[in-house]
Image (tube, helix red, strand yellow):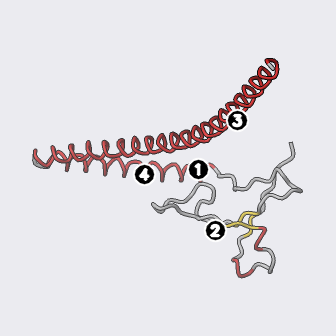
Amino acid sequence: MAPVSITFRMELPELLPEGDEDSVEYAPSTNAYGLVTPSHMGWDWRIEKPTRRNPFSHPTPPMGIRTEREFVDKLDMENFDLKFRLYYLGEAMEKMSPDGLILAKENAHLNTEIATLKAELDHYRGQIELFDQQKSQFHQWSVSKDKEVCAVRAELQATQQAVKEMDDRRED
């Protein structure tokens, strides 16, 4: 296998020659919690887009072991912080008065019921739209069949009239 090469350019956007803006893309270096994203790890990497000449070029830089460990450590810290916050929120909820706890549980139950009822309402609205479409299709089909029945009746009357005239001619 041939080694895959990735080119990184560290110069600022103002230093790029004109017309080169289309060959690079920018990626955010941190997420909402201030953690560095794994593909860029705090650098303002400007990654060249893969071209048709080199379909095997990798769009993101590979992470080294140290970088990967740092990223995992930051995720572990964030996970611990979230668990810690959840623990204290649970304790604060338990310390509430019994009435407040009952109201909080009832509020949570009602919120979930509202969400399920909204989903059910959306489902039934979709069913109503479907039934309206089917009704209009059936109405169109019914109208076309009524026209067809009228045409067949007219043809039947014409045929009966012709038969009656033929019978009258035979009798004469």
Given residues 82 and 52, the one toward you in this image is 52
Mark 3 or mark 1: whose residue is earlier in sequence: 1
Give the amino acid type for the residue marked by disc 2 in the picture. Answer: Asp
Question: From mark 2 to mark 4, how far is it between C-alphas?
Answer: 24 Å
Say which residue label 4 marks: 77
Check residue 151 in the rendering and tell me which mark sits there, or answer none. Answer: 3
Mark 4 or mark 1: whose residue is earlier in sequence: 1
Residue 8, horizontal then vertical, whole percent: 74, 64
On the picture, is 53 further left or further right than 57? Answer: right
Q: Are marks 3 and 4 in contact (CB under 8 Å)?
A: no
Say which residue label 2 marks: 44
Residue 137, horizontal then vertical, whole percent: 60, 40
Question: From mark 3 to mark 1, how far is it between C-alphas?
Answer: 80 Å
- Residue at 13% across / 49% down in the picture? 100
Question: From mark 3 to mark 4, how far is it between C-alphas?
Answer: 81 Å
Give the amino acid type for the residue marked by disc 4 in the picture. Answer: Met
Check residue 68 in the rendering and tell me which mark sits there, or answer none. Answer: 1
Check residue 122 in the rendering and tell me which mark sits there, or answer none. Answer: none
Mark 2 or mark 3: whose residue is earlier in sequence: 2
Q: Secondary structure at mark 1?
A: helix
Residue 28, horizontal then vertical, whole percent: 59, 65
Q: Quadrant of the C terminus?
A: top right
